[in-house]
Each structure stands twice: as structure tokens, then as C-alpha cells.
Amino acid sequence: MPKQKNQKGVTILIAVLILSSVVILALAVADVVGRSNRTSKGIGFSEVAYFAAEHGVEDALYSIERNRTVPDSSASGDLTDISEAHWERTAGVLFDAEAGSMTCAELESMNEGLCVGNWKNNVNKETINVKLDGVDRTFQLELDFSGLATYLPSNISIEGITASKASTTIFYLDTNEIETLTNPSEFNNISVQSRRAVLKITSKDDDGLEFDITTGSANNLIPLGFRITSTGTYKEQKRVIEVQRKNWQIY
């Protein structure tokens, strides 16, 4: 009889151990499932926050591309179809080397591209240095945005080209005027302030073309693009998108 009592005690102990193991396993599984649910929910919230940030970017790009207007320096809004989803956006004009395709040191060893520097005539004049590789290559600078006048220098000059080397044309959008530069003096004083314009320079030289576009006076800058930064928030998640839209191209 004492032996049977010992066997019953061992059986109870084993049952308790098995039950404890089952409980621990169940708790571990529940924790994993809970973490997975929280992760999935966080990913879903993050996607909504990204969508909100993207909406802020698209709103600014629509103003630039479709309406040809400079976006507000700051703006905010909500998503109409998702409550609590919010976006805040800042937009600024790019002037400096960030708007170039490469550094000026890199451009020296390249056949084509654009860089931005401040080295002309030992004064602080912003200068765009452009290289075009071969004939019929074109550089285009778009200054045809409403509201951009406050960022424009009063005038710019183009150095290093003549009418025999390049076809240089300015389209003034407000007046539908087309100006073709032919005389040397016309390259030295091009009025751009308060005028929506597109500048196009096309190489006529088989060997290509290199020229500078320089601001007319010290401390003036040439707008070369836009930077748009949009932050989307939803619940506890936040996402940030930053894009750049350049005003120039080579084709």
C-alpha cells in the first residue's frame, strides 16, 4: 500500500509538470501572436502615414507641373477618406550645388553635365557651368513659374558662347515673346526678374560646348529646382518623404 501512494504522488507531480508546460507554451504562443498583431497593425498604420506624406508631395508637384506655380513654403492637410491621417509639407527653392548634376571638379573630367559654383571675377556671383557633348545637344532652364520672381536675380549673363557656336533662345511666357540672341552684347545682360521665361541653348559645334550662366550682381542666386519635404502621420506612426524637382535639363 505505501508503494501505491508513492506512485499516485509521482503521477500527480508529472501531471502538474505537464500542465505547467502547457500553460507556459500557451502563454508564449499568445505573446508571439500578440507581438505579431501589434507589428501588423503598426505596419498598416505606417503605410497610411506614408500615403499621407505622399499626398503632400503630390499636391506640391501638381502645383509645379500642372499649374506652373511655386508651391507654398508650408502647407498641411488631412486625408478625406481616412480620419486622423494628416500631412505637413515644406517646399523650398534650390539654388546651390545640390541642384547640379555633379561637383565642378567632377565636371572638369566629364564630357557633359552641370555644376554650380561661386568663382567668377573674384566676387560672390553664383555661376552655372554647363558642358554639352557634341552638336544638337541642348541645355534648358525653366524659370516659367508664377511666384518665382522674388527668387530671381535682376539679370543674368551667358559667357563662353556666340551665335555661331550655339542657338540661344528665350521664351517669355507672359507675353508669348520669343527672343533669339545673336549679338555679343545680348548675352551679357538678360533681364529675368519678374518674367516667366524658358532659356534654351543648343550646341552647333561638333566638338560640343562649354559656357557659364552668371548672375548679374553679387549675392544673387539662380533658382535651379525645388525641394519638397512631406511628413505623414497616422495613429502613432510617422513617415517622411523628400523629393527634388529640377528646373533644368540636358537633352
Image (cartoon, rainbow, N blue to C red):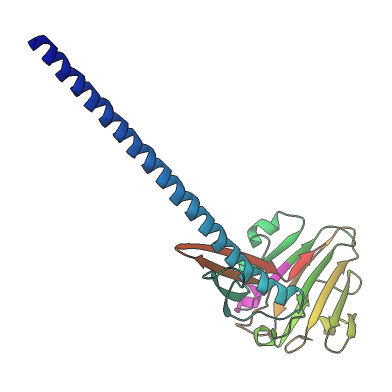
- Work out whether 20 lies above or below 146: above
* Front residue of this view, candidates 19 and 120: 19
- Find out whether residue 170 is within the magenta segment: no
In percent of width and height, residue 112 lies at 76, 58
Residue that appears at 55% across and 71% down: 87
User: Residue pushed farthest front?
Assistant: 1
In percent of width and height, residue 34 lies at 40, 46
* Front residue of this view, candidates 41 and 185: 41
In percent of width and height, residue 110 lies at 73, 54
- Horizontally, residue 109 falls left or right of residue 88, namely right
Residue that appears at 77% across and 75% down: 66
**Residue 26 falls in which quadrant of the image?**
top left
* Front residue of this view, candidates 94 and 158: 94
Residue that appears at 51% across and 70% down: 84
- Horizontally, residue 246 falls left or right of residue 21, namely right
- Work out whether 60 lies above or below 31: below
| Magenta stretch bounds | 118-129
- Horizontally, residue 199 falls left or right of residue 27, namely right
- Find out whether residue 121 is within the magenta segment: yes
- Work out whether 10 lies above or below 32: above
In percent of width and height, residue 69 lies at 72, 81
Residue 225 seen in this snapshot: no
